[in-house]
Amino acid sequence: MRIKRAAFKFKLFSKKQNQIMKWWTDSSPYKDKEILICDGSVRAGKTVVMSISFIFWAMFRFNEQQFIFAGKTIGSLRRNVIRPLKTILESCKGFKVVERRTENLLVVQYKGHTNYFFMFGGKDEGSQDLVQGLTAAGAFYDEVALMPESFVNQAQARLSVEGAKSWFNCNPAGPFHWFKKRFIDNAESMNALHIHFLMRDNPSLSKQVLERYARMFTGVFYKRYILGLWVMSEGVIFDNFDRDIMVAELPNDVVVKRWYISIDYGTQNPTVFLLWAQASNGKSYLVREYYYSGREKGKQKTDSEFADDLMKFIEDLPQRTISVVVDPSAASFIAELKQRKWNIKRAKNDVLDGIRFTQTAMNENKIKFSSKCEKLFEEFGSYVWDDKAAEHGEDKPVKEHDHAMDAMRYYCYTVLAKGSGVSVLK
């Protein structure tokens, strides 16, 4: 049976989206600008329109040239930009698109013009080496605020073709972030067009959808991803914790589909076990906690002793139904647990994304906490952003009072992020 691919259905663009589509055209007052910067709230409709406009500009202005498509990783770039872009272009008459995955290359043909769009991941300082030697006529950066400055500098240095332009897309970070200080704050001197987006600039979002997204975030993430502001990460991180709403015991009338233990491992620092029940009502319940600090107790336990404590921690449960999500840096403890035939998952340790996801799970009523978890509650009130790091444009927590917080994040971002139905915005 032949499966017919669904065609992309176009909707009327907003005023700002139309401005993106036309800024480079001969009739635009911005045609001589060399850079387009679009920042603002999530789901504001900037990425898709920017990618369409980028391709149209390249195909109308150039032939047999090379271009740069950059994301934090090639995987995220394909997912967030390339996949929807291909669907759109295949719905446009006259366009032919071929993706050569082994080369990370998109070949686009239109009315006798053929251009080559190379995909790059700019996740760390070493990524700058990937673009060396390339000659390009334009560059598109998806989520540029997540990329190191060195990668962007190297990619920008590749734009040596006459008439080259740069396209930057991002959600806000801190006010001292290198991209804001260098590009947004100096947009005029850099000959850049800066367009700031809010969610209401996306005509495809209903009022109900806008309200649902607004409920997903609190604190700094609400200011950045909903209000579109470049603000400091400061104060208590999980400021959305509400004991009256979020503290609840595992109900007797629900079925536990699966048990998990999330572990943050320490030597002198505390070791934490958190026992989670994935229930048939779609929620996860933190049932109990284990907290041991070698520094406070004056005696550090061995891996074997911690493994024995883990067995006692769940001695009333059948071990075969439990998966253990462990701090990925705890190599020796992981080896001990594997020797004892535990089902081990190495935790995803993306701190900022994990915090954001955990906040969303809490806001969407996906996780509950037993009243017995007092160490966790203590850390909710003392787990704070590092204001010194924020002054240098970096978002990270203070490395204190974070052990139960880390164990909670490991469970949420490693387990719930896969197929739980909890929304995640990038």
Image (cartoon, grey):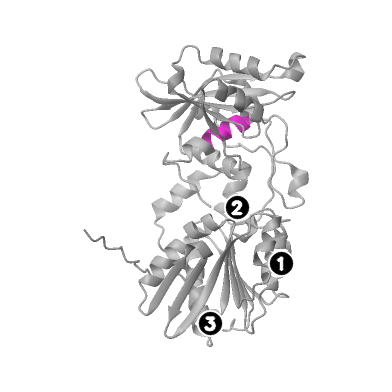
Q: Main secondary structure of the magenta part?
A: helix
Instruction: Give the image quarter of residue 110.
Output: bottom left
Q: Considering only vertical position in the picture, is 410 above or below 192?
A: above
- Which three-letter amino acid code belongs to the residue tagged 1? Asn
| Residue 64 numbered tag | 3
Asked if residue 136 can be seen in this view, the reply is yes
Q: Earlier in the sequence, mark 1 or mark 3?
A: 3
Decide: few, some or many residues near mark 3? Use Cα within 10 Å; few <14, some 14-19, many ≥20.
few
Q: Please tell me whether mark 1 sits on a helix, a strand or a loop.
A: helix
Q: Which residues are magenta?
A: 405-412
Residue 133: % across, % down: 68, 71
Q: Is residue 9 within the magenta segment? A: no
Q: What residue lies at 67% left-to-right and 31% top-to-bottom?
A: 402
Q: Please tell me whether mark 3 sits on a helix, a strand or a loop.
A: loop
- Which three-letter amino acid code belongs to the residue tagged 2? Arg
The quarter of the rendered structure image containing the N terminus is bottom left
Nearer the observer, 272 or 135: 135
Instruction: Give the image quarter of residue 135.
Output: bottom right
Residue 59: % across, % down: 49, 80
Q: Considering only vertical position in the picture, is 219 above or below 415?
A: below
Q: Give the residue pinned by disc 1.
A: 153
Asked if residue 362 can be seen in this view, the reply is no
Q: Give the residue pinned by disc 2.
A: 224
Q: Earlier in the sequence, mark 3 or mark 2?
A: 3
